[in-house]
Amino acid sequence: MSAERTYLPLYAHHHEANRGPSVTQLLGVAVVAAMVGFFGTVALVPRSGPATHLSVTPNTRTAGMVGAAVAAAAVSTELPAFAAQQPVAAAPEQFAAAPQRAAPFAYLADADAPPVIADLQEADPLETLKLGVAALFIPIIGYASWRFGSYKAKVDASEAAEKYAKELEEGKFDKVSPSGIATVKGFAASSEAGWKMQADTLRARGIEGISGEELAKMAKSDDICIVDVRDRTKYKEAFIPGSVNVPLFQPIQGWDLYKIARRVQFAVFGVQGTEYNPNFTEEFNRLVGPQKDKKLVVLDDSVRGTLVPTQAFPEGKAGHALMTIYLALNGGFENTPMTYVEGGIGAYAKADGELAEA
């Protein structure tokens, strides 16, 4: 009795040896799981930071960690099957091309008997059902996440607005965003909106600037307290004898996502990145508080900070000295006379004012 030639699927030997997931499938599982974990955390985790316009974003670091953990867990469930796979054996050497009508099949050509086509193995109905349900749930989960995220965003926005209104009533104006940016009523202190609010307050309190020449004449007076808000390095290089150094800003500290982004922004312009000094209020009260009965002359290294309006800048321009005065007026120094130096320490130096080095 002659042997039968049996048509077999070309992928049959590969399927028998590889019932587990492929590397591509593992990567797909990891990506999908990471996205589910990340965006799920974005929707569920409460917003971090103070309730300001600059800090209503979720904690992306937490979301990233959750996404990575979910991806690792999902991949780990598939690893046993992946590891148990055997190397794919080479296809039989005597496979011959099948007739066109039978493609994509081949048959064993080791006998002269007429070929007998084997019954094709049909897909497992349960597996097909699983794939169908999974495909159906992908858009459903996406839509549900979007709807829940929108609802959560509205709730967060409402809670943030209530908290912000309460803080305004309590006079809490001194804010710092997660990235170290000083804020005023929810806006960056140096932004157009933030500066306008500061300028309006300063003008309403009658704050005016003095020239470098005027400061040079009164620098040794016992009736004033000179407050230098430059960073400590610059202060040590050149400072007015008898002045008090309270840095409003400091070099960026830490390496979280916000801080890295800030460092990159400054690096593009080739300058050192700075952030608001979190200890400024405490240091200011400790060093300047005992002299609040004197007139405070606030000094920085800015040539632009001014309340003098121009055609290009009708509100004047923000500067560290003016920002400091604004914070002081809202931090217990509302009855203390204060002024700033137009042109900063550079104007004082040009007026031949006395300077010292640490």
Image: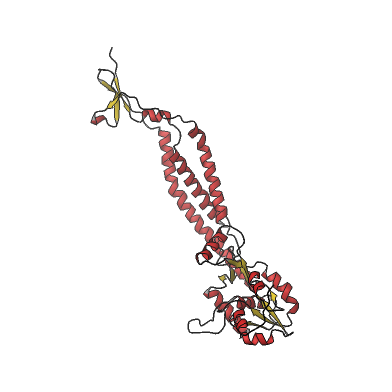
Count of number-bearing discs:
0
Tell me, yes or no, if residue 202 can be seen here.
yes
Classify 122 as above or below 147.
above
Q: Nearer the viewer, residue 293 or 1?
A: 293
* Looking at the image, residue 250 lies above or below residue 340: above
Residue 51 placement (x, y as % from top left): 59, 65
The residue under the point 28% across, 26% down is 96
Figure coloring: secondary structure
Can you give x and y, in whole percent of width and height, for residue 349 in the image? Answer: 62, 81
Residue shown at 50% from the left, 33% from the top: 83
Corner quadrant of residue 237: bottom right
Q: Say if 18 sits above or below 51 in the image.
A: above
Closer to us: 220 or 59 = 220
Above or below, 251 against 142 in this view is below
Horizontal and vertical percent for residue 43? 53, 55
Q: Residue furthest top?
A: 1
Examine the image and state in which quarter residue 48 appears: bottom right
Quarter of the image for residue 59 reads: bottom right
Which residue is at a point 24% across and 31% down the rendered structure image? 101
Q: Point out the image quarter for the N terminus.
A: top left
**Spot occupied by residue 102 in the image (x, y as percentages of width and height):** 26, 29
Which of 355/160 is in front? Answer: 355
Tell me the quadrant of the picture where the C terminus can be found.
bottom right
- Left or right: residue 224 versus residue 263 is right
Q: Is residue 206 visible?
A: no
Left or right: where 338 falls relative to 34? right
